[in-house]
Image: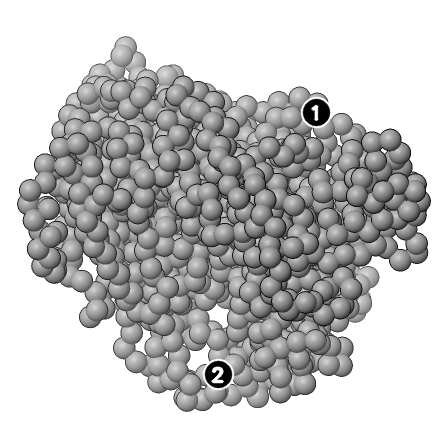
Amino acid sequence: MSHPPDRGVSRRSFLKGSAIAGIATTGLTAAAEAAELHRPPSELGPGEHEITLSINGKARLVKVETRTTLLDALRDRLDLTGAKKICDRGACGGCTVLVDDLPVNSCLMLAVDAVGCELRTVEGLADPADPKATHPLVQNFVACDALQCGFCTPGMVMSSLSCLERRGTPTEAQMRHDLSGNLCRCGTYGRVMEAIERTAKGEGGGR
Amino acid sequence: MSTRNRDTGAPREQVEIPREQVEITVGYRALPGKDQQDRLEKITVEPTEGDAPPWDANTPYKVVGSDLDRVDGFAKATGRAKYAYDQNFPDLQQAMILRAPIARGTLTALDLDEARRMPGVTAVVALKDVGNKVRFVGDAIAAVAAPTLDLARDAIEKIRADYDQEEHNVEYLMSGDAPLLSMGGEVDDEWPADDDIDALLAKATHSHSGTYRTEVQTHSSLETHGNVARFDQKHLDVWSSTQATFGVRGELARALRQRGVDVESVEVHSEYVGGGFGSKFSAGIEGLACCLLAHEAQKPVKLMLDRFEEHTTAGNRPSALMQVRGALDENGRITVWDWRSFGGCGFNGSGGAVRHPSAYLGKAKVRQSHKDIACDTDPARSMRAPGYPQGWFGAELFLDELAAKAGLDPLALRLKNDDEAMRLDQWKFGAERFGWAEARAKQNEPGARYLTGAGLASARWGQLGNHGGRNPHGITCRIHNDGSVESRSGAQDIGTGLKTVLTMLTAEELGIAPARVRATTGHTSDPSGPGSGGSTTTPSLAPAVRHAAYLAAQKLVALVADHLGVPLDEVRCSAGKVGTDKAQLSWTDACKLIGQNPIEAHGERFPNYKQDPFHRGVCGAQFAEVRVDSWTGEVQVTRMFGIQDCGLVIAKKLAESQVLGAMIQGVSYALHEQRIMDQRSGRMLNGDFLRYKITGTKDLPALDCYLHSVANGHDNTGAAGLGEPPSTASAAAIGNAVFHAIGAPVRHLPLTPDKVLAALQKAQRTPR
Amino acid sequence: MRPFTYVLPTSLEQAAEAATQPDTIVKAAGIDIVDRMKERLVTPQKVVNLLPLKRELSQIAEQNGEVTIGAMVTLTQLQEAKQLQGRAYDGLRRAASTTGTPQVQNRATVAGNLLQFTRCWYVRSEAFRCLHGGRGPTCLAMTGDNRYHAVMGWSDCVRVHPSNLAPALLALGAEYTTRAGEAVRRRKLADLFPADPRAQNPEHTLEDGEIVTALHLPAQPADTRLGYAESREKQSFDWATTACAVRVVMAGGKITAADLVLGAVGPVPMAKPQAAQLLVGKEPSEKLFLRVAEAAFAGATPLAFNAYKLPIGKAVVRAALEEATR
């Protein structure tokens, strides 16, 4: 099989068609998938192209290169700066976002690989216009003072959120495990676990 | 002292006004527990005229000391807090620095043309000239700006730089200046003769000697150093990740003078800072590069260091080598203390000083010396209690070894020798709360895999606040006619909670709910404040916060007195009301008397009352319990307890956070952290967070602390900063606990499994 | 990362075909590869992305006791798989749970974990020119700082294989299936690692364009237990300094069969059949475990800064044996 360098479609329409569908197989019907099998592989890049990411329930168009990480796409191109770039190598958890409900390092994920996934970032946990919509976990982070300089905090919040969602009422060992990929230099760990515990107990109000 | 009254603008009288003397009560109430008592005394202080009246041990606080939430907690926990790293502007350029790959030599060629010609590149600047020296791997050579970081990196690869390489050394102990070490790790050099010391050692009941070492720790602030710079004509806005906004402003103005920039035209913004720990006082070469690129590109530029650059070019806590000799008399008093230390610094050969706990040495003949040793690495910078954690580890472990020789409990040795009256109370209280006697009495089963042990160490810091010298720190307080209040400082909140402190002190002074106060920090357009170093920010600014609110209140009081027709001197702001005992307005109604322009007052930080009229330093004590896996040498700190003198506890929750955080950092320093250098290339091998290891949740001990609130009579507020004080003790207490657990001292931080196992094997089966 | 063309196949056939193109690499989650691309150690023209095939390649199925694990099963899925809950798989789940961080486990795939490159700090830095991969004349770790390097099995390159899963899978007698062009091959997992792990031999034996599609765990006899233990300098996110997986089959209080594989001590996972053989026919005892541990490290050749791995590694063998026979 050869790779036609160009099939005469503009980058943009090309991406909106096969490439996105190629990644997002979950959204396709069986018949469409069968048809996909016989398509030649699609190619992206190098250079910029536009993709659609689903972030906190909203579709966002963003221009990226194939080499653009999800973290850079969020921070530099969508101004979603909650996720932080701290080590840029998957070692600190500062860039943690939920991808299909699981916490991942957005610095180690290519933005194009996130097409078709449901992404949740820390920005989705509160609406400045509606304080009542604030997630109780956020309230408890504040109430427990589970933050100092605050730079690790968005990542910590997202790992904590996943811990709560997956485990309901996590044990201490489970919390320690689920947060073990998040570094904090100020030393807030104990209080982060308190915030999770309080949220599990239904404290913190909100939604 | 300022020569101008900031409120009226009128020249202040130059004549010395006799100060009013005020009697205040200092000290603290009895700690909970056995054999504790009130330690209160009356002293006379002389406040500067016009200052807010002093608070003391008898002040009834409403807001201060409460567990109010951190006022910017919500912004941080929702990701909405914008750090320097998070600033985005249309057309923002991303920048990167070309770093020298050699540790020592000369730049012999630099060709930027190809990088300049790359499509998209908007600016390229040289940071060294041909002929300049290269001093360490990572020394800055040139910088590039482009629309994305990937493109900037592509352009960096197009820069040609050649070097004339010289021989280098990145291990200070390999330097010609370094003392010789034996195979066993002991300093081999003879001690200089001293008749007194030699005699005391000779006649001592128990004497001991040892060599102790620590490794380089990097600050590892999670937000790396860096800036976003934007020029608008001659006006320069810089969003900086710094712990010294005013320092950065001055530094950049000086460096950019040739480009028509002066201090008035630079504005630094640091509303949120992702940690500093002593490394972020300067704009650095990266700050200058960012501004130069922004000037050349005529577009906003972001230049943040990456993690490797942060580890290798942004400072560190230097390594230390300490050699100690000492002895006890038959009463367990330390009679002689012979100490020499060596600091492993970077190329500039300074900053390696090591401190030791002098409070134990009141009756001892003391000799001490220190030598800094240079090598071809990034220079040391101050890091959270510079010189203390290193020295405390060596000294406190030495004392435990000496105590073991003398058959003394480590606590008993401290109680016999500690000159700090406050700490004697703290030792007793802490030992009780921690369960010291029980923890020490636990016997490890013979042949057991896991060995437990307990250790303790003192905490100390010598510094409180200051008034700022020729340019006193200030605070602006505004009261608006809707009842809202602003408290503003141009100093930065690096995570210690300055905004919350501003809020609480202002609310306390005005007798209103903290929710009415909005604190703003980190813009140099606001009154100047100190760099956040030496735990001085809170104690330096707190008195000015009070003073500003106090002056603003006086103006409001005047309006209310006039409105109600009551005597001015009977009107007070308290409990949400303004008025006298008989006639009052609610705060909201009182503020309605204010016109369109808010009341504005400038509070000043006056000089301290006297130098530490009540106590000599900030005291604390910490206790640690460890579990050592005797098979693998792995150490788990299982629990820690700390008691910490905080001066006046302002924001209780935040103060606890800071003390607990210092203890966690201490665990990390004790067990994990070390810079590992490749001697051949001069390059750091673990310049990341993969192999530079920092404590995480699975390594976290159960932690508890007690905030010891002390009225110290130092100024009108009496706060103490909490960055440094609790940081001194933790690693030392852990080191002592490991000694107790395995029966052999591990004299070299970090206490990694290889070293613990080696010590264990050496001490093999010695019953303790 | 340098710019690259991203190839998005819609079938395994396409992926296998595309993978044979010059200057092309295959990537799944990319935990290891994106990291090396960021260092600009890997600078391919084309990257074949396997993620579109995730559904096809991330099934776990059991048939007659044999468990087939799709190559793209994540480490998190591996820990939660109902087919892998018995004692025979305890050590496998443990090995997965101590790998990287939870965030990494949520994306990292089983095959990616086995195929990852060494974490040697000379190899993984663009600044160093070492023998590994032919970038320099000598192994820099051999004479440099080798505290985390090999203590056995090395010749001209002292890297260690970093996978936690590999020892556990090897001890279970795993096999793997690959696809290369039209060819489908199934081999013993041991064959995935070079028999002569020299500097110029990559961490694995896959040919260009060959893609791992599945792992197979053979049916285990009744009362099979897999023990796994490791030493590390830090409990939260660290690489093991030594690791050991040991499979024992118990009957009547005795060990009737055993396999023992060490991790993090050599350039490939190190199977220790002679040490394992000492267990067969014996009742578990401390004395026996100490003998086995000694045997597992017999003939070890530590470097200047890693002799500590020997006593620690022996303790880890003992701990894995205790866990398996408890």
Asked if badges 2 and 1 are on one and the same chain, I answer no
Mark 2 residue crowding within 10 angstroms, few (<14) / some (14–19) / many (20+): some
Q: Amino acid at mark 2?
A: Lys
Asked if residue B624 lies left or right of residue C103, the reply is left
Residue B128 is marked as 2
Secondary-structure class at tag 1: loop
**For the residues marked 2 and 1, what is the alpha-carbon distance in whole angstroms?**
57 Å
Place residue B316 in its image quadrant. bottom left
Asked if residue C36 shows in the view, the reply is: no
Q: Is the N terminus of chain A in the top left, top right, bottom left or bottom right quadrant?
A: bottom right
Q: Is the C terminus of chain A in the top left, top right, bottom left or bottom right quadrant?
A: top right
* B238 in relation to A133, above or below: below
Secondary-structure class at tag 2: loop
Which of the pair A190/B584 is nearer the observer?
B584
Q: Residue at x 12, y 51 (%)?
A: B197
Q: Residue at x 88, y 41 (%)?
A: B566
Q: Residue at x 24, y 28 (%)?
A: B409
Q: How is the image coloured?
A: one colour
Asked if residue A107 lies left or right of residue B421, the reply is right
* Place of residue B463 in the rendered image (x, y in percent of width and height, measured from the top left): 46, 52
Q: Chain of mark 1?
A: A
* Place of residue A35 in the rendered image (x, y in percent of width and height, measured from the top left): 76, 48
Which of the pair A167/B10 is nearer the observer?
B10
Asked if residue B331 shows in the view, the reply is: yes
Q: Amino acid at mark 1?
A: Glu
Q: Do residues under tags 2 and 1 come within 8 Å of each other at their CB atoms?
A: no
Q: Chain of mark 2?
A: B
Which of the pair C51/B55 is nearer the observer?
B55
Q: Residue at x 32, y 39 (%)?
A: B419
> Which residue carries the number 1 mark?
A203
* B604 in relation to B365, above or below: below
Which of the pair B139/A41 is nearer the observer?
B139
